[in-house]
Image (cartoon, rainbow, N blue to C red):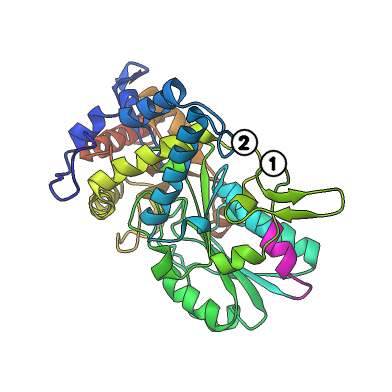
Amino acid sequence: MSTETTKKDFLFDVQKIKSDFPILQRKINGHRLVYLDSGASTQKPIEVIDAHTDYFKKINSNIHRGLHTLAEDATNAYEKTRSHIAKFIGGTKTSEIIFTAGTTESINLVAYTWGETNIAEGDEIVITDMEHHANLVPWVMLAKRKNAIIKRIPITDEGRLDLSDIQNIITEKTKLVSLTHMSNVLGTVNPIKEIVQIAHQKGAVVLADGAQSVPHMPVDVVDLDVDFYAFSAHKMLGPTGVGVLYGKEDILDKMPPFNMGGEMISEVSFERITWAELPHKFEAGTPNIAGVVTFDTALTYLENIGMENIHAYETKLTAYAIKKLIQIDGLKIQGPYNTINRGGAVSFTDKNLHPHDISTFLDSKGIAIRAGHHCAQTLMKRMRTIATARASLYIYNDEADIDALHDELFAMRRYFGHE
């Protein structure tokens, strides 16, 4: 898809989009690749691949340090991506956009800086029963260090947050509420704005894990009024090793730095060290410059389609996938069947087959899905299962991909003698 295409005149031509992704032309075990693991990492269009190569061909240099042309070009490209991200997520200040290695590091940054400073014995940290380990382990460990209390927002059997007792879960003792915007297992899109309002009324700060939401729908962090928001480039057509932490400027200003070293300082002596201004206070050392610069092209690709168009298309495709999969006797979808406030992470179990066997069989037919606990072991316990198989959808998937999944799941059950 040409980057000259505008959102206004774009028609969702999936075959044209597919043609932009070279890896989708690959054969797996003699079959066409049906890639249904975008919740783990998305594939890359040729524009992004070329942008990564062009960086090394044309402007490779360290940033913020040199006065030569290459250094200035690299710095400008790096900071251009920061400005692009600020606009992409609702028009924040560039000083509020911090580059990290991924969503996991973004959340840990908050835990080890804001958390260590603001959480004390007896304070409450509220999370949910559907969190990825990246948004659970840092808070559990922080609570252990500080003798704080972890409280959980439960989920219903359908896989939605149960907010019936939310006023008693989030209290005046709550210092932090940290929750996923969209579950990587259930596909559930949580009512972040409503929860933020309740948390702020009680004086609590809110962090949202946006790893599964920013790639799939319009996100406006200013409208949501979250205090922190974290996401990753590799789940939205960009490279691995690039994450983003958005934080409100007044909160970031008061936080100590995370890593110590070059770039994050203002003045250094043996007697006194002062920190650099935002956002550089949190960006020590040489970052993944090529990845950040490349991410700019991925954002443009998504914008040319339009995040509203992406969300509408994926909602329709998710509904089709659920409709097809529930036709298979003995197969259960874990998560909401209704696609209102639901994304394209479709997890399922088969009463007779382990998810690992399902994944291995499908791979033999060229279909890539994820199987396991999806870094959400506490959620698996709530769902009374040890693992699920997960098909996660993106812009390059279509009904033919869903049909292939459906047909091979039927064939698999015959193969294992369960049909």
| Displayed quadrant of residue 2 | top left
Does the CB distance between marks 1 and 2 fall below 8 Å?
yes
Identify which amino acid the numbered label 2 is placed on.
Thr
Identify the residue at image location x=41%, y=59%: 188
Residue 242, percent across and down? 52, 40
Near mark 2 (Cα within 10 A), the count class, few <14, some 14-19 or many ≥20, is few
| Magenta-highlighted residues | 112-122
> Was residue 121 drawn as part of the magenta stretch in this picture?
yes
Quadrant for the N terminus in the image: top left
Identify the residue at image location x=62%, y=82%: 171
Residue 294, percent across and down? 42, 35
Q: Name the residue nearer the viewer: 58 or 301.
A: 58
Mark 1 lies on residue: 262
Residue 116, percent across and down? 74, 63
Q: Name the residue nearer the viewer: 318 or 380.
A: 318
Q: Main secondary structure of the magenta part?
A: helix
Mark 2 lies on residue: 286
Quadrant for the C terminus in the image: top left
Residue 260 appears left or right of 358: right
